[in-house]
Image: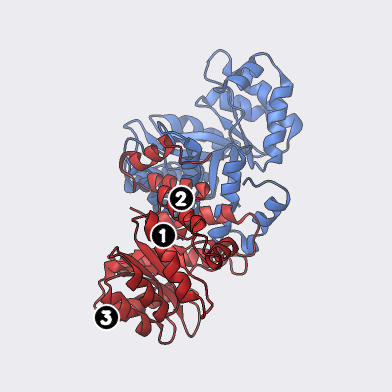
Chain colours: A blue, B red
Amino acid sequence: MFTIVAERINCTRKAIREATEQRDAEVIRTQAVQQTEAGATYIDVNAGAHPDTELGNMRWLLEQVQAVTSLPICLDSPSAEVLAAGLQALDGRPAMINSISLEEGKAERLLPLVQQYNTRVIGLCLSSEGMPNTAEERLAFATRLLETTRAAGVSDDRVYIDPLVRCVSAEAEQGAEFLKAIRLIHAAHPDVHFCAGISNVSYGLPQRTLLNRAFLTMAIWEGLDGAIIDPLDQGVMSQLYAARAVAGLDEYCMEYMEASREGKLGA
Amino acid sequence: MFTIVAERINCTRKAIREATEQRDAEVIRTQAVQQTEAGATYIDVNAGAHPDTELGNMRWLLEQVQAVTSLPICLDSPSAEVLAAGLQALDGRPAMINSISLEEGKAERLLPLVQQYNTRVIGLCLSSEGMPNTAEERLAFATRLLETTRAAGVSDDRVYIDPLVRCVSAEAEQGAEFLKAIRLIHAAHPDVHFCAGISNVSYGLPQRTLLNRAFLTMAIWEGLDGAIIDPLDQGVMSQLYAARAVAGLDEYCMEYMEASREGKLGA
């Protein structure tokens, strides 16, 4: 199975921010229902970045989402305080924390919550010294992240590594280095999962969705088993089903044929 | 550069067969012009399989194609006699022969033409004993093909291996075995090129173009540098440009951006 962390309920998007500020429950609930029906595995909830409002927004958003879907929640915040409040507001369903990294103090602040609430966690290959360039650097970042999570008693299968997608417009090899990193990390840490934000690959280029879909397809072939995506984007979802079928990850193409029968696949 | 062998002028297609029987030059010339403008590298010409008409059809088709494009021709026939007549009918432009294989006597019949006319040649991983199953069997077939071409004085860079795409609907692993074969053959024979017929992967499944595009994308990442495709299929061509950009094969994404500017890319 592929883990789809559904990205639409995010207060950095204007429509969601406004609906949240106005406490327009219908907008948020519709997003949660639609993403659930489209095949989401987790509903990501990002309550914005304003220190004054983020905690209250997070609680209100979680109330709306939990009212209409039984899916697990991916709590998306850099703040331990907001994450703790969010975890307390959950009705006992499973959760994921988005995200820890190697940035100064970040894992130390957030891992106690992963332990206490037995959540899953996204581990982003990013440190205070900067971003990884090569596949080998990404593997080294992932290994350091896993040393931290293991020391906190978190088993590898609860960790979802994001090897950090960078744009190919400036450095043509960044796509290839990411793809090779998936292969290396998978080989070195077979129990770990992945959850990547794909769309950075196309930053600065036209017709970005073509590039995002091609990149997702290659990453699935290399072993990517999760991504932060918009499950209402039929093109991306079609590509996901098709990629898993031709890569041999969908026995007898059952999932692909079912999605086709249900009218879920685009042209 | 990616080698696009443009597949549309093929008498197994009804419209082309009828236009050829009726000597409707305009239909054929339009196909040749459109495929040239869409970015073809070679124009494939297949004159049908009827022993009575194939040779005459081939000569007539080549006359029409050569009248409107200066692209090299890929002569597509199992008959040495038809291929020889076709090669004699060329105006000196480069040619490719589609295809030799390990089927009994086939390479022996056709390789003298490859030598005499200094053509390129597609080598299909197929023998009289049957089709390869695993990546390793595909590598073994390719190696045997290359022993034959080398013995005939044909350098590896004139050979385009087709590792034989098989459908994933019956055997889910056939896509993966093909993709691994690209990697193995590329590593063992670095000078050889590839030219695969992609669309068999989706045989028996709905919405085949989704699967064909995903498979082409993965194959490009593994090193596929040529395919027999329809360059008028904007979806396939868009995917090809996008795949090369994210795989790091398109420096500064120049080809991708030019294709986008010229309106060549679909949604």
Q: Is residue B110 above or below residue B28?
A: below
Provide the residue designation for mark 3: B152
Distance Cα–Cα, label 2 vs label 1: 11 Å
Q: Please check whether the numbered discs 3 and 2 fall on a single chain.
A: yes
* Label 1: element kind: helix
Which of the numbered marks, if any, corresponds to residue B65? 1
SS at mark 3? loop
Residue A61 sits above or below residue A218 on the image: above
Of circles 3 and 2, the one toward us is: 2
Q: Are marks 2 and 1 on the same chain?
A: yes
Chain of the residue displaying label 3: B
The residue pinned by badge 2 equals B34
Q: Chain of mark 2?
A: B
Mark 3 or mark 2: whose residue is earlier in sequence: 2
In-front residue for pair A217/B58: B58
* N-term mark: 2 or 1: 2
Q: Is residue A193 visible?
A: no
Q: Residue at x 29, y 68 (%)?
A: B158
Residue A205 position by quadrant: top left
Q: Earlier in the sequence, mark 3 or mark 1?
A: 1
Q: Name the spot of residue A158 as percent of width and height, x first.
A: 55, 46
Foreground label between 3 and 1: 1
Residue type indicated by callout 3: Ala
Question: Taking B156 as reference, is B102 left or right?
Answer: right
Q: In this rendering, would B227 be left or right of A63?
A: left
Q: Mark 2 falls on what kind of element?
A: helix
Q: In front: B64, or A220?
A: B64
Any part of residue B237 in sight? yes
Q: CA distance from mark 3 to mark 2?
A: 36 Å
Q: Quadrant of residue B245?
A: top left
